[in-house]
Amino acid sequence: MATDERVAQFLQAEAEASRLVEELSKLQKETEAYSAASKALDEAVQQVGTLIQEVSRLASGVKEVATTLRDIGTPALLSGQEALTEQVEGVRGELHGVRNTLLFGLPVVFAVLAVAIVILVR
C-alpha cells in the first residue's frame, strides 16, 4: 500500500506541477500583454504630447489673427471689402467691353480680310 500511496502522491504532484505550468504560462501571456499595452500607452502619450504642442501653436496663431483683426477693426475691414468689390466690378466691366469688342469686331476684321483676299486673288 505504501507503493500505491507513493504512486498516488506522485500522480498528484505531477498534476499539481502541470497545473502550475499552465498557470505560469497564463501569467507569462498576461505579462506580455501588459507589456505590449504599456508600450502602446507610451506611444499614445508621446503622440498626445506632440498633438498638444501643435494645438498650442495653432491657438497662438489664431490669437495673433484675432488680435490683428481687432486692431484693424470691423469698419476698416468692411471698407476694404467694399473697395475690392468696386475694383472687381470695374475690371469685370472692362473685360465685358473687351469681350464685346472681340465678339463684334472680329466678324468685321474677317470680312475685310476676305475682301482683301478676293482682291489679291483676282
Image (spheres, rainbow, N blue to C red):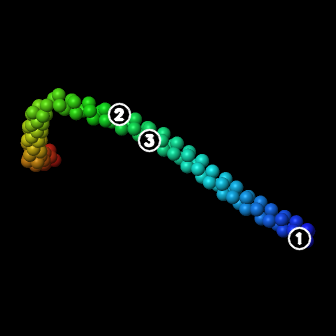
**Residue type of the residue flagged with mark 2:** Arg
The residue beneath circle 2 is 57
Q: SS for tag 2?
A: helix
Measured as percent of width and height from the top left, residue 100 is found at: 8, 46
The residue beneath circle 3 is 48
- Residue, x 66% and y 57% (percent of image)? 26
Comparing marks 2 and 3, which lies closer to the viewer? 3
Give the Cα distance between marks 1 and 2: 79 Å
Q: Are marks 2 and 3 in contact (CB under 8 Å)?
A: no
Comparing marks 1 and 2, which lies closer to the viewer? 1
The residue beneath circle 1 is 4
Quadrant (top left/top right/bottom left/bottom right) for the N terminus: bottom right
Examine the rendered structure and indicate whether residue 103 appears above or below residue 81: below
- Residue, x 31% and y 32% (percent of image)? 60
Measured as percent of width and height from the top left, residue 42 is found at: 52, 42
Badge 3: how crowded within 10 Å, few (<14), some, or many (20+)?
Answer: few
Q: Is residue 79 left or right of residue 58?
A: left
Give the Cα distance between marks 3 and 1: 65 Å
Comparing marks 3 and 1, which lies closer to the viewer? 1
Q: Is residue 44 left or right of residue 16?
A: left
**Residue type of the residue flagged with mark 1:** Asp
